[in-house]
Image: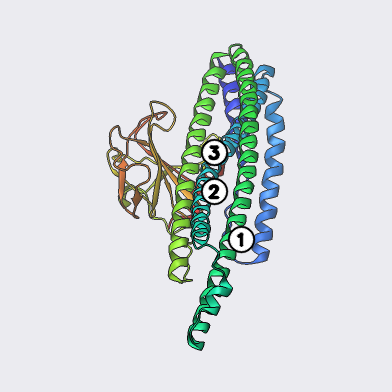
């Protein structure tokens, strides 16, 4: 039994160290270049020390567990490629729709111009042999002559312009058709490649399932938690992408409005930090930091002193709700907020039925979003609080203490 507990502890440590090494984003608050250099040197030293410790622990892992870890990395890689292809397919589909609308408009414009030219030619035909010279010679005064000359000049210019416009429109239609066909081919290529990647992903997942079945009960339990966290990370990434797309569309609309009004004023940029505590001040005591007591990486801080159950949870800063979930595992009931300054916050293990915000909703600093509970993988009432930096994934978690007062 002691051997199993030791093995489990070693597995937890290696997973925590791997996650720590995968963190690529560093929040920098240094004010001078020397401080930045010092921070970089300290970070590199920490990475080197962690790598050494990782190799020591890794040698004590079972060979099957190591194979499962390799398969996990392959799954994550395939899933990332599939997500990228999905984005390409969505972009290509949207572009095809836009190009088709433009093509329809150009063809409608061409029909209108050709109809106008046809009516002009019919009118000219009905006029018989009357020429521009006849019109000029029929002038009964200098004023009439000049007026008729000007009219003839305008008619000639208008005819020439109309014919040239028809030529240009026809060329634009041909160009649009070519671009449309190219985009459709790109879409088909992305779809075929996505199918292949999905097949590869399914094969690797099947291989992983076979390997996991050979693990001990403790190892399987640990792997289940890893899978749950990876699934939640995928959900969060998708929600962030959706929110960023909505923000980009809103920004484009604002820019269009600003351009039309002739204004060049830009919005002030927010500065990371400026958070309030996510629970009432009398409960703002951190009971677990970025690392557990046994050394495993926590990636968050917990507020869990006695009496905190049912207390309100506040948005630490204004922003937009990216995601709300009610799970029986992992984070349990949780809320994630985008603060539009490169930071995201996640509030987990909320009381059942207490979430009072929804995705897409703008919240102000200090606004209640749920209540403290003990849902999901929780051993008692507490608030699990994370700060993440862009792009907001599981490996982008940073120490919240740098943001509090």
In the rendered image, the residue lying farthest to the bottom is 142
Crowd rating for badge 3 (residues with CA inside 10 Å; few <14, some 14–19, many 20+): some
- Given residues 170 and 95, the one toward you in this image is 170
Q: Is residue 289 visible?
A: no
Please identify the quarter of the rendering in which residue 39 is found: bottom right
Q: Which of marks 1 and 3 is nearer the N terminus?
A: 3
Which residue carries the number 3 mark?
Answer: 93
Crowd rating for badge 1 (residues with CA inside 10 Å; few <14, some 14–19, many 20+): few
Residue 390, which numbered label? 2
Quadrant containing the N terminus is: top right
Residue 208, which numbered label? none
Residue 164, which numbered label? 1
Separation (CA) of disc 2 from disc 3: 27 Å
Please identify the quarter of the rendering in which residue 196 is found: top right
Please identify the quarter of the rendering in which residue 352 is found: top left
Q: Which of marks 1 and 2 is nearer the N terminus?
A: 1
Q: Which element carries disc 1, helix, strand or loop?
A: helix
Q: Where is residue 326 in the image (x, y as percent from the top left)?
A: 36, 31
- Given residues 341 and 21, the one toward you in this image is 341
Tell which tag, 2 or 3, sits nearer the viewer: 3
Q: Position of residue 2 (x, y in %)?
A: 57, 17
Q: Which element carries disc 2, helix, strand or loop?
A: loop
* 154 shown above or below 94: below
Q: Kindly identify the residue that appears in the image at 51 percent across and 37 percent down.
A: 293
Tell which tag, 1 or 3, sits nearer the viewer: 1
Are the two marked residues, 1 and 2, in contact with CB atoms closer than 8 angstroms? no
- Given residues 385 and 202, the one toward you in this image is 202
Q: Position of residue 103 (x, y in %)?
A: 54, 46
Q: Kindly identify the residue that appears in the image at 54 percent across and 38 percent down.
A: 93
Quadrant containing the C terminus is: bottom left
* 148 shown above or below 261: below
Q: Kindly identify the residue that appears in the image at 52 percent across and 22 percent down.
A: 224
């Amino acid at each position: 039994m002691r051997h199993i507990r030791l093995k489990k502890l070693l597995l937890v440590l290696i997973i925590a160290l791997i996650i720590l090494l995968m963190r690529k984003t560093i929040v920098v608050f240094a004010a001078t270049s020397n401080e930045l250099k010092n921070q970089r040197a300290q970070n590199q030293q920490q990475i080197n020390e962690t790598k050494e410790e990782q190799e020591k622990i890794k040698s004590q892992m079972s060979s099957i567990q190591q194979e499962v870890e390799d398969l996990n990395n392959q799954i994550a890689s395939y899933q990332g490629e599939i997500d990228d292809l999905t984005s390409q397919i969505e972009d290509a589909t949207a572009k095809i729709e836009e190009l088709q609308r433009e093509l329809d408009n150009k063809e409608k414009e061409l029909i209108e111009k050709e109809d106008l030219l046809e009516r002009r030619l019919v009118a000219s035909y009905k006029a018989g042999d009357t020429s521009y010279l006849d019109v000029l010679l029929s002038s009964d005064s200098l004023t009439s002559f000049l007026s008729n000359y000007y009219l003839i000049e305008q008619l000639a210019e208008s005819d020439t312009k109309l014919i040239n416009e028809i030529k240009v429109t026809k060329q634009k239609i041909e160009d649009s058709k070519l671009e449309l066909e190219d985009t459709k081919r790109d879409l088909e290529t992305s779809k075929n490649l996505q199918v292949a990647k999905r097949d590869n992903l399914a094969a690797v997942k099947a291989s992983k399932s076979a390997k996991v079945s050979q693990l001990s009960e403790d190892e399987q339990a640990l792997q289940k938690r890893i899978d749950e966290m990876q699934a939640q990370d995928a959900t969060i990434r998708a929600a962030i992408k959706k929110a960023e797309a909505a923000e980009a569309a809103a920004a484009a609309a604002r820019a269009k409005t600003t351009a039309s009004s002739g204004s060049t004023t830009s919005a002030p940029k927010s500065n990371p930090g400026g958070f309030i505590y996510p629970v009432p001040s009398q409960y703002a005591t951190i009971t677990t930091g970025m690392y557990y007591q046994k050394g495993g990486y926590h990636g968050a801080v917990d507020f869990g002193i006695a009496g905190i159950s049912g207390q309100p949870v506040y948005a630490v800063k204004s922003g937009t709700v990216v995601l709300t979930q009610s799970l029986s595992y992992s984070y349990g009931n949780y809320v994630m907020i985008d603060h539009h300054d490169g930071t995201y916050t996640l509030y987990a293990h909320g009381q059942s039925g207490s979430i009072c915000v929804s995705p897409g909703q703008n919240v102000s600093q200090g606004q209640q979003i749920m209540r403290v509970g003990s849902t999901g993988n929780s051993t008692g009432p507490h608030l699990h609080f994370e700060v993440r930096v862009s792009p907001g994934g599981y490996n982008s978690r940073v120490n919240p203490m740098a943001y509090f007062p």
